[in-house]
Image: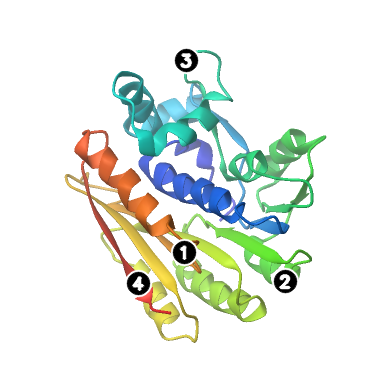
Amino acid sequence: MLSYLHAFHAGNYADLQKHFALYATLRLMHNKATAITCIDTHAGSAVYDLTSEQARKTGEAAAGIERLWRTAGQQPLASWTDFLAAVADLNSGDTLQRYPGSPAWFQQCQRPGDELLAFELHSNETSRLQTWAKGKPVRVINADGFRGLLKALPPRNPRLLVLIDPPYEVKDDYLTAADTLLKAWQRCRHGVFLLWYPLLPAGLHKDMLARIQGGTMRKVLRSEVWLRDPPGRGMLGTGLLVVNPPWTLEEQLAQAINDLDHTGILPCHYQSDWLVPE
């Protein structure tokens, strides 16, 4: 589990879905003034260098944020305007070199009174995260995010937003993620939870979804992006569960992903339904 480094995958198409949903959720939750406790269970690094050796080795950003960045410069996409403006804040001019990880998306939207807890188990990632967090109202915790989330609940603030984004390097991560989500919801039933998962040929996510469906949790939106022409190896697509999604999030997600498909940025089939109804 400690061998995973998101630097190899930063800015790929899965990040586009996950971070768009996170950013849109934060902005919608800000329609109310009450403070939010934000928890990132597997934070990684806050900012990624797309020119680094790791990023260039896989080239995954080329089919994700880099393609979106280029296309939007020629053919602006209204659904992605604010998202790309946030990415541009990390870069100089029209050159794309850096991409924000989930802690940076959280922190960019952080208001006075909002709390941000970022869990990271990998020691080197934690060190980079702590360096980035200096001078910011961010609490970095070098610990297992599954256990850390449960210890942090119930939150101190009136509202809660959680991103659960494990590496899924081991099969146990799927059911651990499901069980952690179910327990966390029991401790804060009004909280908004985002759970990301990869869509792999082995279909390991199905047991996770079945575990969640068999629980007592309600109002769970399922958002899945399936590649039209998936590679011979690797992910077939990317999935996201949103518990207690804010009003209009479902429509915003559908519009954003369908825009990627229609423009050819990401040829895909988008599926959205209620895994568990209200």
Residue at (66% x, 42% y) in the render: 125
- In the displayed structure image, the side of residue 29 where residue 247 appears, left or right: left
Alpha carbon distance from label 3 to label 4: 39 Å
Distance of mark 4 from mark 1, alpha carbons? 9 Å
Residue 266: image quadrant is top left
Mark toward the viewer: 2 or 4: 4
**What residue is rendered at 55% in x and 72% in y?**
181
Which amino acid type corresponds to the residue marked 1 in the rendered image? Val
Which callout, 2 or 3, points at the residue further toward the start of the chain?
3
274 or 79, nearer to the observer: 79
Residue identifier under label 1: 242
Q: Nearer the viewer, mark 3 or mark 1?
A: 1
Q: Are marks 3 and 4 in contact (CB under 8 Å)?
A: no
CB-based contact (under 8 Å), mark 3 and mark 1 = no
Query: Camera-side residue: 112 or 182?
Result: 112
Q: For mark 4, does the 10 Å Cα neighbourhood hold few (<14), some (14 to 19), or many (20 or more) residues?
A: some
Q: Are marks 2 and 3 in contact (CB under 8 Å)?
A: no
Establish if 110 lies above or below 167.
above
Label 1, residues with CA under 10 Å away: few <14, some 14-19, many ≥20: many
Task: Tell me which label, 4 or 1, sits earlier in the chain.
Answer: 1
Residue named by callout 4: 274
- Tell me the residue at 56%/56% (across/down): 1
| Residue underneath mark 3 | 95
Q: Which residue is mark 2?
A: 153
Q: Is residue 238 visible?
A: yes
Asked if the residue at tag 1 contacts the one at tag 2, i.e. Cβ–Cβ closer than 8 Å, the answer is no
Judged from the image, the secondary structure of the residue bearing numbered disc 2 is loop
